[in-house]
Amino acid sequence: MGFEIEDGTGAGYLAAVDSLNRLRTFAVSEPDVDAASDRGDSYNYNTGIINLTSANKSAVFYLKNNGVLPIVVPTLFYLWGNSNVSGVDVLVTVLRNPTAGTIISGATDMEMPGINRNFGSSQGLTTDAYKGAEGLTFTNGEKVVESIFTQSPTRAAISVGAIVLPKGTSLGIEITPGTGNSDLDVEFAAAVYLRSTT
């Protein structure tokens, strides 16, 4: 069973229907993250600089969603500073749902723990957002991404394909610097947004 749509061109609130009964429309689309920024639902997390003084594994980034709406993490960022060694491999591991380790029990807040990307918005997120340090650990969690990078001064994005953190879930990052490292500045960040219910 069909219904009729009145041809109301020009008034701005009715649809246009042509002589072949086709509905004429005009649509504007934008990426989810841009729409989230417009709503005040897009945020930056940044650990600040962490100095790693060995080639041992260290937990450096922890984010847990304590809010109602899912948090979407489309991109992670890293920065390597100068090091006493260069051109060696750095191993970065992203963990799914870590819940324990000294990065969590020690609980040092990130330098930027969820800064709203809409500068006119006062909205915030309900999260645990901790930065790590040399020798801190995750003692559980499941590996979901593991990548090797070159230890030399650089800043780059790690596309992770829109990780979703529903309420109560978490994301962790650990790094194993290159062989011989004794002085490497690192920084990790995430650009995230809330998944809208509309």
Image (cartoon, rainbow, N blue to C red):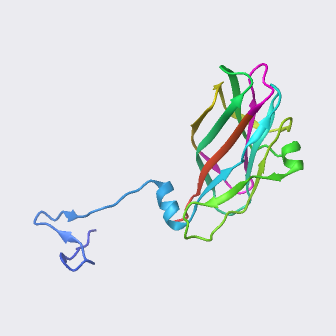
Query: Could you tell me which quadrant the N terminus lies in?
Result: bottom left
Taking the spot 64% from the left edge, 26% from the top edge, the residue there is 152
175 is within the stretch colored magenta: yes
Taking the spot 64% from the left edge, 60% from the top edge, the residue there is 115
Q: Is residue 34 left or right of residue 91?
A: left
Is the residue 127 above or below the residue 105 in the image?
below
Q: Quadrant of residue 12?
A: bottom left
Q: Viewer-proximal residue, 41 or 177?
A: 177
Residue 2: percent from left, percent from top: 26, 69
Residue 103: percent from left, percent from top: 84, 44
Taking the spot 67% from the left edge, 58% from the top edge, the residue there is 114
Q: Which residues are magenta?
A: 163-184
Is the residue 194 above or below the residue 139 in the image?
below
Q: Viewer-proximal residue, 27 or 106?
A: 106
Q: Quadrant of residue 54?
A: top right
Residue 121: percent from left, percent from top: 57, 70
Q: Is residue 19 left or right of residue 24?
A: left
Residue 57: percent from left, percent from top: 81, 30
Q: Viewer-proximal residue, 16 or 26?
A: 26
Q: Residue furthest bottom?
A: 11
82 is within the stretch colored magenta: no
The number of numbered discs placed on residues in the rendered structure image is 0
Q: Is residue 104 left or right of residue 163?
A: right
Q: Residue furthest left?
A: 19
Q: Is residue 72 left or right of residue 176?
A: left
